[in-house]
């Protein structure tokens, strides 16, 4: 399994295991019937970070959080909890990586007028 896919897998497991309220609610893509609150693994990208003959990538991953508009406070708490669970964390048994950095946390009203949207963006330097 490639590093980017493995990183998504371990981030998903970390959130499920450490963020109360999102147990079993971290998915790749939501359906209309998916109950609130939930998280989806959003866009990701990477840039080469090769040094001293070590193949490495600096991977950025976005975690999107969703709740109904009437629960903006709960979504703010979940966004903060996800950021806290990932800040400085690494799973070096699963992947050769450096501790994660949280580079963005944001909560906003969604244009659909029904939901609120939280974003947590993390970066991790992964080798291999």
Image (cartoon, rainbow, N blue to C red):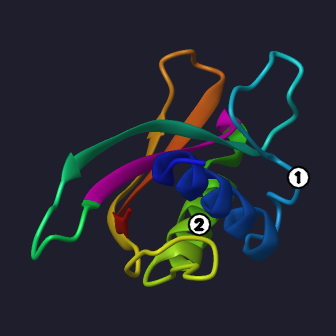
Would you place residue 35 above or below residue 52 in this image? above
CA neighbours of label 1 inside 10 A, class few (<14), some (14 to 19), many (20+): few
Residue 96 x/y as whole percent: 46, 75
Residue matched to label 2? 82
Earlier-in-chain disc, 2 versus 1: 1
Left or right? Give the position of 113 relative to 12.
left
Residue 58 x/y as whole percent: 27, 59
Q: Residue at x 43, y 84 (%)?
A: 88
- Out of 118 and 103, give the one closest to the viewer: 103
What is the number of the mark on residue 24?
Answer: 1
What is the number of the mark on residue 97?
Answer: none
Residue 16 x/y as whole percent: 78, 63
Picture quadrant where residue 103 is located = bottom left
Q: Residue furthest front?
A: 53
Q: Residue at x 34, y 51 (%)?
A: 60
Alpha carbon separation for disc pair 2 and 1: 14 Å
Q: Which residues are magenta?
A: 57-69
Q: Which circle, 2 or 1, is nearer the viewer?
A: 1
Q: Is residue 2 magenta?
A: no
Q: Secondary structure at mark 2?
A: helix
């Amino acid at each position: 399994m490639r590093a980017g896919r493995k990183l998504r897998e371990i981030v998903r497991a970390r959130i499920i295991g450490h963020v109360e309220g999102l147990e079993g609610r971290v998915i790749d893509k939501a359906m209309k019937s998916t109950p609130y609150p939930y998280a989806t693994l959003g866009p990701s990208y990477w840039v080469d970070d090769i040094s001293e003959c070590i193949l490495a990538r600096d991977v950025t991953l976005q975690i999107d959080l969703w709740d109904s508009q009437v629960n903006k406070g709960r979504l703010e708490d979940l966004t903060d909890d996800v950021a806290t669970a990932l800040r400085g964390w690494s799973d070096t048994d699963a992947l050769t990586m450096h501790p994660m950095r949280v580079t963005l946390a944001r909560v906003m009203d969604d244009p659909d007028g029904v939901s609120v949207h939280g974003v947590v963006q993390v970066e991790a330097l992964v080798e291999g």
